[in-house]
Image: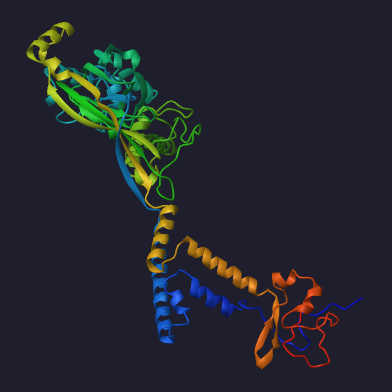
Amino acid sequence: MPRPHSCCPRGAPLAPAPGGSFAQITARFLRVTKIHGLHHMGSRRQSRPRCLLWGLAFLLSLGLLGTWSSNRVRYLLSCPVHSRVRMAWAARLHFPAVTLCNNNPVRFLQLTKPDLYSAGQWLGLAGENRSLLPGLLEGLPDAQRHWLSRLANYSRFLPPRRSERTMHSLFHRLGHQIEDMLLACRFRGEPCGPQHFTPVSPSPRGGRTRYPGALGGQLAGVRDETSFEAGIRVQVHSQDEPPYIHQLGFGVSPGFQTFVSCQEQRLTYLPQPWGNCRASVPGEQILPGYEGYSIAACRLQCEKEAVVSSCQCRMVPHATSICSPNVYIECADRTLDAAVEDSQDRCSCPTPCNLTRYNKEISMVRIPSKGSARYLAHKYHRNETYIRENFLVLDIFFEALNYEAIEQKKAYELAGLLGDIGGQMGLFIGASILTILEILDYIYEVSGSAGSSQACVGRGQGGVTQTLGTRLSPPIAGRPCGTLGRHAEGAYSTSILPNHRHRYAHQGIFEDFAC
């Protein structure tokens, strides 16, 4: 088998190909790069001190770029937010739910002697020894004072073997009913009545009635039959959340027509890590007994769990037994007070990510006029004083068909980070995306030079070193081997083989070729 021809003469040293060394590639990159300062460092016309100054300036700019970029990265990782407020118009708005609660938990004139005996302390009428509170009778009319004094006389009273079975039945029997309270109602210009209201499970603070409205309404002639706390408590809230009226409601006094102008607010919060809101998943029941998550539902659930844990009963119908009045007085009342005071520690109720609430502006005028008082007194067979002290009118309406959207937005995102870093790169070192491609191309060229082919180093005339590549240039490589004898500098006969030196001296420079 013939031995392959060598590309270099025997004894010729090997050296890197032209432009293939790391130093040469780096020098060429410094001369052609568009990064400010680097081409001054690689310029052959610059003196060494000037190259050092340009190098220091470049390193300083690079340090400032790194400092600013790290600051922007830390700002992105801090998850900053900002709020956006805008006003939007709507052709139709859902009317909020309206919950009414009489300030007097029970109808005073419906009390019986057993009721006063067992629940008088909880109702605020009697002390621990079941005697009436001092000063209570002084504020009552003569007829009611005489009636209550006779009711509180237990000299010949035989206590019942068992009191009212549950608080639920007590409220149902003694509490105010919507049929007795509501005298007139109009909704969207149409008459409405008690059948359009939904009773809500009684709260420990009093019975409640909820009206699931739709576009606007008026409650006229609501009667408040009480002698201690005049008026009703009202809460305007979203249809999707239960009422929390003892903390979020506002009062409406008898003898006044109260106007409540509402504006819907739609709030949107961000989940973690930007915020701490609780996202609701469609179809997921987060709290037992409630369709969706809300702060009010979470607080009510905490109160229920506290009563069940301490008293082994519930205030509303459930699988667990309902609290009796005695158990409520001895246990549940104190537990609920403690739960309200320690609500921040006992309950973790984050804000829902989507929340609807209603801003309210309340104004009122005194009613009735003298003519209206005489008419109502004749209609309901009451005197004018009773009408002024027990009748009220409540108007709830939308201020305008618009809503206020308050949205929590991400203040800084990845696109902003890239834009800031790109701007600072252009400011400090004059770099861009194409400059990064130049650097990548330089890295690729350096890594490729490590495995590139080497060249032969030979001696020509006059001791000039010539580097002979292992590959032929395309014009030479394209020629047939027979034409090599006619080379201008290697004019030898075709009988002389390549890589073979003639034994006679020859004028001119001989070159070796690998054919």
Which residue reaches farthest left?
Answer: 370
Camera-side residue: 190 or 177?
Answer: 190
Quarter of the rendering containing residue 95:
top left
Image quarter in which the C terminus is found: bottom right
Is residue 157 at least partly visible in the picture?
Answer: no
Camera-side residue: 25 or 115?
Answer: 25
Image quarter in which the N terminus is found: bottom right
Q: Position of residue 418 (x, y in %)?
A: 44, 57
Q: Residue at x 32, y 43 (%)?
A: 84
Q: Position of residue 373 (x, y in %)?
A: 11, 12
Is residue 113 at least partly visible in the picture?
Answer: yes
Camera-side residue: 72 or 343?
Answer: 72
In the picture, measured across the screen, residue 419 lies left or right of residue 189, that is: right
Which residue reaches farthest right?
Answer: 1
Quarter of the rendering containing residue 380:
top left
Q: Residue at x 48, y 82 (%)?
A: 44
Q: Residue at x 30, y 25 (%)?
A: 99
In the picture, measured across the screen, residue 142 lies left or right of residue 187, that is: left
